[in-house]
Amino acid sequence: MTSIPALKVEDLRKTFGDRAPLLGRARAGVQAVRGVSFAVAPGETLAIVGESGSGKSTLARMLVGLLPPTAGRIEIEGRALDTADPARFGRLIQYVFQDPAGSLNPRRSVRRILETPLKLLHRMPRAAREKRLAELLAAVSLPADALDRYPHEFSGGQAQRIGIARALAADPRILVLDEPVSALDVSVQAQVLNLLADLQRRMGLTYLFITHDLAVAEAVSDRVMVLYFGAVAELGPAREVFASPAHPYTKLLADSAPVVGRALRAPEAAEAELPDPRHPPAGCAFAGRCPRADALCRAQEPPLEEIGDDRLAACHHPLRE
Amino acid sequence: MTAFLQRLARNRLAAAGGAMLALIVLVALAVPLLPLQDPNATATAERFARPLSEGHLLGTDHLGRDLLSRLAHGTRLSLAMGFAAALIAAVLGSVLGIVAGFLGGRVDNVIMRGVDMLMGFPYVLLALAIVAALGPGLVNALIAVAAVNVPFFARNIRGVTVALAGREFVDAARLSGMGNLRIMAVEILPNVLPVIVIALTTTTGWMILETAGLSFLGLGSQPPQADLGSMLGEARAALISHPHVAVVPGVMIFLVVMSINLFGDGVRDALDPRLGAGALTRPLPATVVDRPAPPPLREPDPPALLAIDDLRTEFRLGRRVLPAVDGVSLSLGRGEAVGLVGESGSGKSVTALSVMRLVASPPGVIAGGAVRLDGEEVIGAPFEVLRALRGRRVAYVFQDPQATLHPLYRIGDQLAEAIRAHQPMGARAARVRALELLRDVRMPRPEDRIDDYPHQLSGGQRQRVGIAMALANNPDVIIADEPTTALDVTVQAQILALLERLRRERGLSILFITHDFGVVAQLCERLAVMYAGRIVEEGPTAEVLAAPAHPYTRRLIACVPEPGAGRRRLEAIPGLPPRLDALPPGCAFAPRCHRARPDCGAGDIPLRRAGARAVRCLHPETTP
């Protein structure tokens, strides 16, 4: 990458519950994110794929300033953000929530929801606000009369459009999309994904697209980052990562997705469990589930290394075709 | 708001209380305008005049003061004191509750421990102590009563706020640039307001009593000023000889407090959102059946184990009738797996629940059709027969095992209960069988897990327990309603493989309800696609997926991104699914369909069969 990355993250970490309570001693904290580094180019879409417990939501909340990181550095367009202040982050990076109904206050009208970032983040005068509100609604293809209605009057797909409009109202450079379509019906999912693609093209936005669905990740992203247990397992161009995974965990994910025309089989035994997040194992976190694991894997944590053209994997024994 | 007023008016007791309260408040407000005597004018010559005596409608007290006038002024003062105390307590308590609940951590700890200390004293003692410290008098009694009631509000409001503070709309507000103060005022307060109003209306009566109590003890209003409590206190000495002096304020206290309480309960019931959803009307043990005679038994071609025939299930909400399932016919052979595919609101889950009459009633009603198990009609069977079938021959696996397992019982006990519901068996034998079931569903280390509580298991393990419970009585049919939707993909693959193995090894029939074509393709030989309460296409899975005949099926399959195709634009279906109470005539999909022609909206379109396939479309994509 020659230009300045839109977003650069260095060794970001988050540990929960390691602070000492008022009375008593600190316990070992839950290590939700264990040192994640990556960079996203302007206008790029990076998909972040992981299952529950992978730390993808914690990572996303740190990126928008809703959670202060325990350690690490976040840079947006070359400038470091060192305080966890959503108001400062808000003009640069915004968030679209998974559950459209839960992320809209049931007692505020759409107008008031969309107006807030205009007023507070941009100090926009009334006349300019009216103009901008109309633009926002048009951008997400909602009728103009939606402004004076309340969130419960909208279907899931429409509510998610309101959520997207609210994020766009802050006029950010980057959008973090946290499973933006997984609460929606299949036929509506595609509408929202296409809308997001149009907006990106028109406004030159950079996307971080969090999802558990590999097929969706591949359809919307340029590159994909697979998270396992709070750390990056693999990072690379979406199509290549899924077509020929290098990390055994990526392969397990790809093999598990139900696909039309593929016979059903359980790719691994039922005993497979995530490691204890309070006391992570010494070596590779995936070693306990990995068919290729050996003594080295159990003793030493593999670093994230270049394994090919623009491809990175954290594995001592990466798969090669 | 109008719905709230309607609900309130329907509650007769509350309406009566409200009317009484309104009358009392009106009179109290109008006191300065009424032609009343001076309440403090003494006339010792006329002391203890009986009610209805000349010039004194309610008689006089021990100083000859007019009781009617004192009652009117006293009620006015007592009401004002009670309302003021309630308002002060509500404002202070709500502010403390919102701040503690929203900020959490140390702030929460300090505020709530203070509130706890306030609650640690008996409230009369506390009020007495406050008045003793500040000296007797109206204002000090008011402060005491308000202070004593602050904890009640603080604790209530804090509880509601804690739940709200974790909601995503609060995060969204932060990202919109709001600070804590603004979020509390603009985002949290409107959402806790109903709770504050409920707490206020249910405690005002109580606070009027408490202020009257302090005045009765001589710590509130000072002579000669009258309030209801001090009137009662002064009448105490003459209680035996001249009871009417005590009875008059006593009856008024009773009327005031009673009317406030009745009205307050009514307001609470009308505001409580759970009542709107019908939570207090307990659902019946089986869905109500209100149908014309069941359709005659048609011998299906391959004899079916489970045959759903022209099933109609409606939700009757007041005058509105929503046809959730509108004439669905589907059969399931022995050892067969059939997928029922549709989006939310398509009626797939209601169809599944109707089989064993598990749709919540009210509002659900089975309005037509039949379900036959081995040729025996189930819908019209007596409840005892139905109960013997539930779990014994037809078992369900639901989407969220967290919600279907009881959180307070060990999973082994819950399994044993499911077994013993249908088989006479000792506790020990049931436990052995429960262990066997956990092994059947490949639970890791079942001996250790059997005594765990549901929250100690992972999502995948909980779903294994859910399946073990369904298998407990060796059913013939398992109806699985989105059993893997809440699970991670790697766990989903394990659960699907488990269901497939059980089907092969035990000859189980599975009705699999899902929105995911990938899952159906892997597990089911046949599938049926539902849209707006009807089956629009049916046939062997491979054939339907390869060449869908209904435009909806084709477009729905195209919506789902498939791996391996790289970055691209997805094929979306324009528009939204129709509302069930406003279905278009003819084909419900026509308004969204690219192949629709005028005749699609003309009239009812039958499901046309051709061999193993069926489609409900006048202009299908392919002729099956």
Image: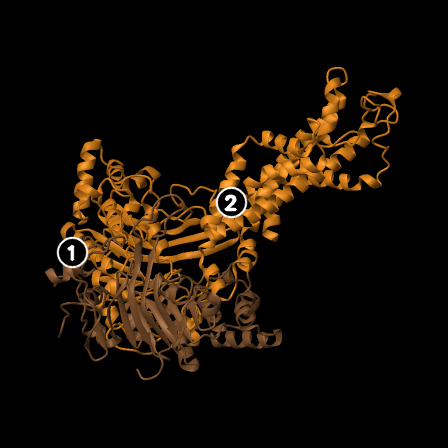
Chain colours: A brown, B orange
Q: Is residue A182 above or below residue B441?
A: below
Marks 2,1: beta carbons within 8 A: no
Which marked residue is nearer to the observer: mark 2 or mark 1?
A: 2
Q: Looking at the image, which is closer to me, B286 or B415? A: B415
Q: Is residue A108 above or below residue B502?
A: below
Answer yes or no: is residue B550 visible.
Answer: no
Task: Examine the image and state in which quarter residue A161 appears.
Answer: bottom left
Name the residue at 39% across, 45% down. B287
* Marks 2/1: CA–CA distance: 50 Å
Residue B196 lies, in percent from the top left, at 57, 46
Residue B266 lies, in percent from the top left, at 59, 41
B597 sits left or right of B157 in the view: left
Q: Looking at the image, which is closer to me, A196 or B363? A: A196
* Disc 1: CA contacts within 10 A as few (<14), some (14-19) or many (>=20): few
For numbered disc 1, what is the local secondary structure? loop
* Disc 2: CA contacts within 10 A as few (<14), some (14-19) or many (>=20): some
Q: Quadrant of the C terminus of chain B?
A: bottom left
- Circle 2: residue type: Ile
Q: Looking at the image, which is closer to me, B602 or B24? A: B24
Residue indicated by mark 1:
A269
Residue B254 lies, in percent from the top left, at 67, 30
The chain identifier of the residue carrying mark 1 reads A
Name the residue at 74% across, 35% down. B75
Residue B331 lies, in percent from the top left, at 26, 56
Q: Residue furthest top?
A: B241
Residue indicated by mark 2:
B111
Q: Looking at the image, which is closer to me, B354 or A21? A: A21
